[in-house]
Amino acid sequence: MSVHVTPLVRVQAEDFDVGAETALLCQGRTDIGAIVAFTGLCRDEGGKLAALELEHYPGMAEAEISRICKQASARWPLSGLSVIHRHGKICPGGNIVLVIAASTHRQAAFEAASFIMDFLKTRAPFWKKEWMKDGTAGNWVDAKEVDDMASERWET
Amino acid sequence: MRLVYFSWVREKIGKGEEDVELPDDIETVRDLLSWMKTRGEEYEAALEHQDVIRVALDMEHVLHSEKLGTPHEIAFFPPMTGG
């Protein structure tokens, strides 16, 4: 049932365009029936945050995202998969992460995108540091227990 | 052996990477963490809460109970907060 899918994985400082990435994934395809695109943004934390600085482990970030994509495509019949994660300084309103999952039917696309996000949060080597508007630098964001629980729910 | 550090582990140790000769009697990742803490107070501070420290061998996550083996690169970092 599963089509061979080669996931597109990119870790980059540059911004991305959801429309352009979706078009790229669908180019020349007529078999895709459902696309779920998730975009994670930098929020301003009630107006207090000036920017997030995302540190990553070059090489392992790409490798770990690829491993997560491989697990997702083994679990759901996906026709296409793109994951882009940014690093560096990102201001409120800016894009952080993009997951596009394509399949014949919507359920696989929804679930795969959700699965990938849950595991990106807990296994992809990225760390966020907060830069505040009042000039105070850098508290590292704490990992959330709720994120661990979110990824554990797939262990069935 | 190349050691690399990220996030507040990197900041507390005060460097992002270094090449280190490991003692022969280190068997597991847990042994390695214990030895690392004896290397100076900055290491002791960075790795104080040993259980929360994540370790990757050649860019793959491992449990502290895992055998160390002979990796090229060992990474130490806090729980991840990407996405």
Image: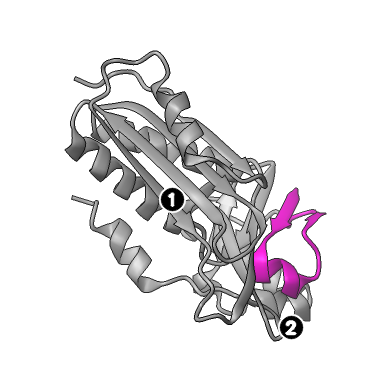
Label 2 residue SS:
loop
Q: Amino acid at mark 2?
A: Gly
Q: Is residue B41 left or right of residue B63?
A: right
User: Which residue corresponds to the image point at 38% horizontal and 48% vertical from the top-left?
Assistant: A38
Question: Of label 2 and label 1, which has the lower sequence position?
Answer: 1
Q: Is residue B3 magenta?
A: yes
**Rendered location of residue B47, percent (x, y):** 63, 74
Label 2 in the same subunit as label 1: yes
**Which mark is drawn over residue A39?**
1
User: Which residue corresponds to the image point at 41% horizontal and 72% vertical from the top-left?
Assistant: A144
Q: Is residue A109 left or right of residue A128?
A: left
Marked residue chain, label 2: A
Marked residue chain, label 1: A
Looking at the image, residue B60 lies above or below residue A10: below
User: Which residue corresponds to the image point at 67% horizontal and 47% vertical from the top-left?
Assistant: A13
Q: Amino acid at mark 1?
A: Thr
Q: Which residue is mark 2?
A: A135
Q: Which residues are magenta?
A: B1-23
Looking at the image, residue A51 lies above or below residue A14: below
